[in-house]
Amino acid sequence: MARGLLNKLVSRSLSVAGKWQQQQLRRLNIHEYQGAELMGKYGINVPKGVAVASVEEVRKAIQDVFPKENELVVKSQILAGGRGLGTFKSGLKGGVHIVKKEQVEDIAGKMLGQILVTKQTGPQGKPVDKVYLCEKLSLVNEMYFAITLDRKTAGPIIIACRKGGTSIEDLAEKYPDMIVKVPIDVFEGITDEDAAKVVDGLALKVADRNSSIEQVKKLYELFCKSDCTLLEINPIAETSDNQLVAADAKLNFDDNAAFRQKEIFALRDSSQEDPREVAAAKADLNYIGLDGEIGCMVNGAGLAMATMDIIKLHGGTPANFLDVGGNASEGQVVEAFKILTSDEKVKAILVNIFGGIMKCDVIASGIVNAAKQVALKVPVVVRLEGTNVEHGKRILKESAMKLITAEDLDDAAEKAVKAVPT
């Protein structure tokens, strides 16, 4: 939900290509309960809560963690927004419920193991393997807070709004004057003046100003030390006991920092991810699933995007972004074909290779070996150019595979679109 808005607020000049490019970046996303636990380690105020995976654990948590609570918040845990307005495929409405303590076991049981569909999951939905039980806070004011990265200032930027708990996109459109943006000097770090601007932008009603400034500084510390790309709290709220509390949170992390954030990246929940993207990551391939019918295997992100564009130009739709990179092995090419053919929507495959570091004969050998391991039931269009191209073409020809060859990118895209059964 937040990423599209934050980009609008930070830079309103993104083209369609740029917007797509935004989606291909891999960022670790963790569950709400995991984010709350991480924030607690940095001294950030969060509601008391516990994640449970079974009705038995629900029962134990009520006894051990919430013995004096009369009401609890029961939150389904999926890696997508819009849970509150979502619908379970079982028919249960809403992925977030505030209920009496004696009803918690029943509502949690109806969520666990079910599929929740929200505006962000797509019609397939996502499985709820855990629910997060939280104390019900007495909130007197709900606001919005986020930290993300700003291309314009080449550093972090804090975005705050005096209204929260609802769609920030709508608020930004209706009340743009309520949005406060505070860029942070990445070398100097956050200052008291920066934090004060954010707190003043939140227009606090009851929370202590100085304590709130310290909370903002701790949130920034978490953002930097954990290599976050996004820290969004909606709502960040004031409670009746005059505290500023992160009532809900979404955190994304830069995958390039996995080597130094091993504890955080161990939290990755692959059950919430596209299985094709999980398989691609294991094979060290850059893959993003899309909704089209022409599978693409290309070397280089720029050439991959150009290939997708020209497929659209000829009236087709790409089924994926798949960049095998410049040093792919024969085995990686085989894995790439397995991923492409696992997608039932793929009706044709276009292989577009411009050999530089990536040699055309390696790609050709990978295609032939993939055909031996995977039943290729769809047409395959191949365009090879560059290093060892003649050797590559000879390998394909001697394989006796039924391939559609192309001389250039335009020819390849046109043939791929025509190869799709109508």
Image (cartoon, grey):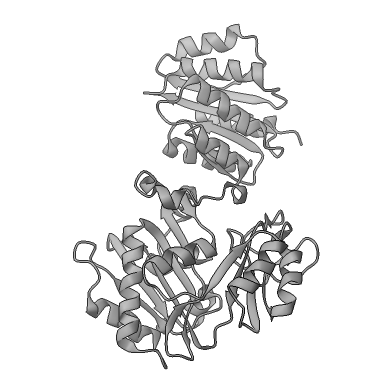
In the displayed structure, 385 sits above or below 106; it is above
Outermost top residue: 398
Q: Position of residue 307 (x, y in %)?
A: 51, 37
**Residue 165, placed above or below residue 106:** below
> Horizontal and vertical percent for residue 76?
65, 65
Q: Quarter of the image holding residue 201? A: bottom left
Q: Which quarter of the image is occupied by the C terminus? A: top right
Closer to us: 322 or 413? 322
Q: Position of residue 129 (x, y in %)?
A: 66, 56
Between 99 and 380, the one nearer to me in the picture: 99
- The quadrant of the image that shows the N terminus is bottom right
| Residue under the image location 51 percent in, 35 percent down | 282
Q: Residue at 22% of width from left, 74% of height from top?
A: 191
For residue 194, say whether it is visible.
yes
Above or below for 172 versus 139: above
Residue 93 appearing in the image: no
Most distant residue in the left direction? 188
User: In this rendering, would 274 be left or right of 305?
Assistant: right
Spot occupied by residue 262 in the image (x, y as percentages of width and height): 40, 47
